[in-house]
Image (cartoon, helix red, strand yellow):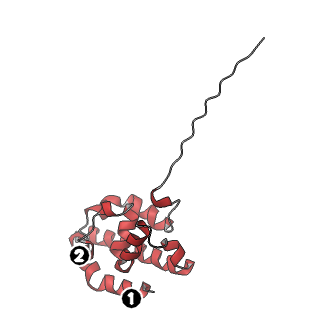
Amino acid sequence: MIYLSRNLEQKLVLSSPKGMSRSIFPHVQAMLGSRRALVEEAPEPDHMAYYTQDDFVDLLDWFYCAMLPCKIDQCLAWYAGKGPRAKDLYSEWELAAQSNVLLSCLSLYEALERSNQLHKVGLVMDSIGAEMIDLLLSR
């Protein structure tokens, strides 16, 4: 008596663009995920006028560059294969500081939305907000 068996195994392999495996800002990623529509509906800061969300791998990268304008060149260089990843550029402390800034910016978006002032987010970020953030985080 011969028994034949057939095994079929399905495997789902997820690959992410640019070799990313997980976010260096997991708390921001989680908060951004539940507030995606809020961020997408808000006017963009003036310094992002030359870019669209399609220029970035995901909404988090776009938000990172929108809130931290000094990081745009680094991000785009990495996309072009001409620069290191952010996680290779900064210490854990610096990444934590950037994460806190991004979380604060998301909180600002929420506060402006609650007061029906979301249209002012670009103005706020383009004035003192972006410059102050750049000064705090520039290397």
In front here: 52 or 97?
52
Residue bearing the label numbered 1: 135
Instruction: Confirm whether residue 102 shows in the render.
Output: yes
Label number found at residue 100: none
- Amino acid type for the residue under numbered disc 1: Leu
Give the SS element for disc 2. Answer: helix
Q: Residue at x 54, y 42 (%)?
A: 12
Residue bearing the label numbered 2: 46
Q: CA distance from mark 2 to mark 1?
A: 18 Å
Expressed as whole percent of the image width and height from the top left, the position of residue 82 reads 44, 71
In front here: 22 or 112?
22
**Which quadrant of the structure image shows residue 91?**
bottom right
Give the SS element for disc 1. Answer: helix
Q: Residue pushed farthest right?
A: 1
- Amino acid type for the residue under numbered disc 2: Asp
Q: Is residue 10 above or below residue 31?
A: above
